[in-house]
Image (cartoon, rainbow, N blue to C red):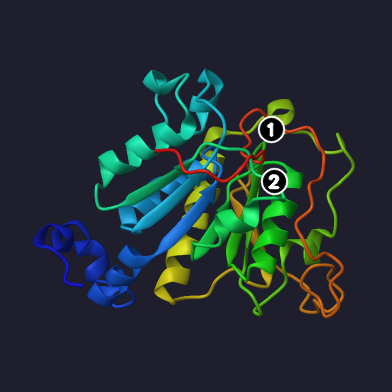
């Protein structure tokens, strides 16, 4: 696949990098990334993946843009209030880079359809903000052997880790099971500083880009945390022993994704229906 003159100019700052080059940019153009959630994390991740020229990007979200979203969900504007988030995201991404094919899924996700949804993508980004969705995504990705980036933000703090099949622990290895319902506040209850989504969501995009390129060290086997008040990052090594994990261990007991019940934040995209692509 030869790049056009316009593409060579658009991606020139990538192409001059020895870690990318023309060959790497072509890998990005052929890459497919699915983002579950067009909110605080998914918005910056989607914009940077589109800008980078990732050829196919899927966006999953059932909600409409609300005025309270705009403090952190930078892919949407005031004029988009009331519009489906996936439509708003697609319009912003394609206005930035018409090279990119954006598949939109205005839907709720559950155990009956998530495996089908993620199957056609190379890398998954978890942009949700509730535990049921995170365990659902983790288990589906493990079962379908799909790499993914987990992240979470609340108040002035954020964290992320990356799962690659066979290369480190999954989310369930670390956190085992969702906490009891209402044990952990949602972002609506606790608040979140808007720029935190930009910091952590951009790092998720970076993990996806590195995976597609096959360069650098991914956050496999590690949890990266960030405290914005102290401006400190910490990289925590995760246990290497995954043998007893209920989903990725030697004798798994979880053979299908599970729907857990918990109150969710108004911006979450962790609720699903049948997989359908919005045109």
Eyeballing the image, is 250 above or below 48? below
Query: Is mark 2 in CB contact (under 8 Å) with mark 1?
Result: no
Q: Residue at x 66, y 80 (%)?
A: 166
In-front residue for pair 259/3: 259
Q: Crowding at label 1, few (<14), some or many (≥20) Cα neighbours within 10 Å?
A: some
Tag shown at residue 110: 2
Q: Position of residue 138 (x, y in %)?
A: 69, 59
Front in this rendered view, residue 49 or 230: 49
Quadrant location, the C terminus: top left
- Packing grade of label 2 (10 A; few <14, some 14-19, many >=20) is many
- Is any part of residue 75 visible from this angle? no
Identify the residue under disc 1.
187
Helix, strand or loop at label 1? It is helix
- Along the line of sight, which residue is nearer the eye, 108 or 66? 108
Find residue 15 and report its horizontal and vertical position in percent: 23, 69
- Tell me the quarter of the picture where residue 165 sits: bottom right
Q: Quadrant of residue 209?
A: bottom left
Q: Is residue 212 toward the left or the right of residue 244 in the image?
A: left
Task: Give me the C-alpha separation between circle 2 and circle 1.
Answer: 21 Å
């Amino acid at each position: 696949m030869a790049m056009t003159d316009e593409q060579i100019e658009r991606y020139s700052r990538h192409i001059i990098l020895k870690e990318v080059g023309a060959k790497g940019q072509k890998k990005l153009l052929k890459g497919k990334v699915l983002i579950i959630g067009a909110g605080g994390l998914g918005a910056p991740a989607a914009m940077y993946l589109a800008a980078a020229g990732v050829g196919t990007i899927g966006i999953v979200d059932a909600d409409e843009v609300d005025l309270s979203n705009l403090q952190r969900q930078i892919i949407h504007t005031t004029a988009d209030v009331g519009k489906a988030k996936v439509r708003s995201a697609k319009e912003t991404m394609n206005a930035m880079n018409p090279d990119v094919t954006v598949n939109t899924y205005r839907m709720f996700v559950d155990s009956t359809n998530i495996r089908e949804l993620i199957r056609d993508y190379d890398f998954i980004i978890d942009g949700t903000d509730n535990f049921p969705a995170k365990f659902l995504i983790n288990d589906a990705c493990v079962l379908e052997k799909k790499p993914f980036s987990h992240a979470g933000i609340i108040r002035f703090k954020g964290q992320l880790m990356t799962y690659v099949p066979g290369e480190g622990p999954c989310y369930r290895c670390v956190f085992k099971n969702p906490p009891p319902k209402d044990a952990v506040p949602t972002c609506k209850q606790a608040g979140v500083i808007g720029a935190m989504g930009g910091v952590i969501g951009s790092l998720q995009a970076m993990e996806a880009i590195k995976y597609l390129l096959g360069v650098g060290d991914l956050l496999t086997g590690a949890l990266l945390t960030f405290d914005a008040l102290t401006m400190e990052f910490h990289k925590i090594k995760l246990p290497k022993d995954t043998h007893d994990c209920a989903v990725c261990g030697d004798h798994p007991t979880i053979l299908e994704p599970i729907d857990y019940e918990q109150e969710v934040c108004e911006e979450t995209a962790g609720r699903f229906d049948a997989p359908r692509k919005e045109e």
